[in-house]
Amino acid sequence: MSQEKVNQYKEQKANRKELMAQEKRKKARTKLIAIVVTVIVAVGAAGAIGLTIRNEYKAYIDSLPSYSTTSFVLTDEAGVLNTDAE
């Protein structure tokens, strides 16, 4: 080995603890970011699904007939209820 390689190896060996700690922090940070992104995507998908279900349900409810009115409208198709006497 050349002297340069020997010096580089000694430097790496001397700083091995710091380098390993940096690597561990980098891996932990990457894992944390991956988890956060996964959670955000999952929550977004669940929200979209929930919103779709809600909209479908509201459309279904709106399509049902309403029986809450108390007035009765009678249409005079035959003209029997005409009050004007001829």
Image: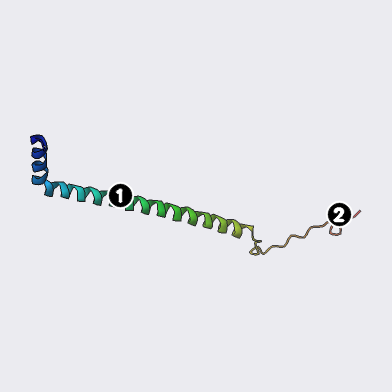
56 sits to left or right of 17? right
Instruction: Decide which of 77, 50 is in the foreground and name it.
Output: 50
Q: Nearer the viewer, mark 2 or mark 1?
A: 1
Residue 84: x %, y % from top left: 86, 54
Instruction: Decide which of 75, 25 is in the foreground and name it.
Output: 25
| Image point (69%, 62%), residue name | 71
Q: Which residue is mark 2?
A: 84
69 sits to left or right of 24? right
| Image point (89%, 55%), residue name | 85
| Mark earlier in primary sequence (2, 1) | 1
Q: Given the image, on which type of amino acid does mark 1 rest?
A: Ile
Residue 62: x %, y % from top left: 61, 57
Residue 3: x %, y % from top left: 8, 35
For the residues labelled 2 and 1, say whether their Cβ atoms are less than 8 Å apart.
Answer: no
| Image point (49%, 55%), residue name | 49
| Image quarter of the N terminus | top left
Instruction: Decide which of 78, 52 is in the foreground and name it.
Output: 52
Q: Name the element at disc 2.
A: loop
| Image point (60%, 59%), residue name | 60
Q: Which residue is mark 1?
A: 33
